[in-house]
Image (cartoon, rainbow, N blue to C red):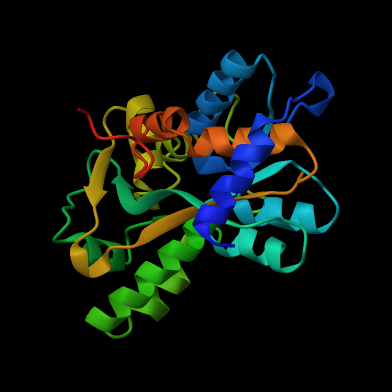
Amino acid sequence: MKLRTLVAVLAVLVSMPAKAADTPTLFAAGSLKTALGEVAKAYTARHSMAVATEFAASGLLRKRIEEGARPDVFASANMAHPRKLAAAGIGGPVMLFARNRLCAIAQPGLAVTSETLLEVMLRPEVRLGTSTPKADPSGDYAWELFGKADALKPGSLKLLDGKALKLTGGPDSPKPPAGRNTYGWVMAEKQADLFLTYCTNARLAQTEVPGLQIVALPESLSVGADYGLTVIGADKPAAWQLAAFILSPDGQTILDKYGFTVAGVPAEK
């Protein structure tokens, strides 16, 4: 569907009155919990309608949807999961709504910089944490980084694949205590010396554990993440209304505040 057509469809559907019984349900990537949690509250304040939210690894949420769960909106940390649902006839058009990047967080005492990051990751004594590939796009992006590392230093992929600790994002991954940031908790518990995660997660973890270091990836290892959403409750005006709100300047401004790269915020005049 062309963007112009999609915008027109959204405009018509969003103008339809939403009823209390149409309360929308949002499934979203765990990395969106803080940002889209605030977006949901802003939507409620605007439309006097609560949003039921559930945050988890995108791949696990996609699997639940394939098995019969029916949220109204699915917001993923990649484009692949919502596209797979759309191809199966479960979701509608997939819309890019934010971008993120991979960063590293390091324990306070670890000597590491962007320039030495690969060398430090390869050291046998350094415990390298990641999320779980396939279940969580963050893990897939980490393995994309490993592939880039292999191009720079042959043998890196095999070494990193063998040593990486898949600490988060899997179906059996330990959950942090209520109210704790997953990555701040993992690092505070000393489960890893270095952890690859989204830059937005790194910022939140550092807020919770101030001594943590945030290490930007060098350009040669840089990995970006495109976030896509799809409307599943296509017959519910509130579902389209929520999706449009996420894509609106109000929703995009909140995402921008939490470090996501967005396109829907007007330039200041």
Q: Position of residue 169 (x, y in %)?
A: 58, 50
**Residue drawn at 49 percent across, 30 percent down:** 34
Q: Is residue 171 visible?
A: no
Q: What is the quadrant of residue 240 in the picture?
A: top right
Q: What is the quadrant of residue 135 in the picture?
A: bottom right
Q: Relative to residue 253, is residue 173 drawn left or right?
A: right
Q: Relative to residue 197, is residue 45 drawn left or right?
A: right
Q: Is residue 192 visible?
A: yes
Q: Position of residue 197 (x, y in %)?
A: 40, 50
In this rendering, the answer to whether 254 lies above or below 196 is: above
Image quadrant in which the N terminus is located? bottom right
Image quadrant in which the C terminus is located? top left
**Closer-to-camera residue (56/267):** 267
In this rendering, the answer to whether 196 lies above or below 86 is: above
**Residue drawn at 49 percent across, 60 percent down:** 139
In this rendering, the answer to whether 176 lies above or below 105 is: above
**Residue drawn at 68 percent across, 38 percent down:** 13
**Closer-to-camera residue (45/117):** 45
State the count of labels: 0
Q: Position of residue 226 (x, y in %)?
A: 44, 56
**Residue drawn at 35 percent across, 30 percent down:** 257
Q: What is the quadrant of residue 262 in the picture?
A: top left
Q: Relative to residue 237, is residue 264 drawn left or right?
A: left
**Closer-to-camera residue (244/8):** 8
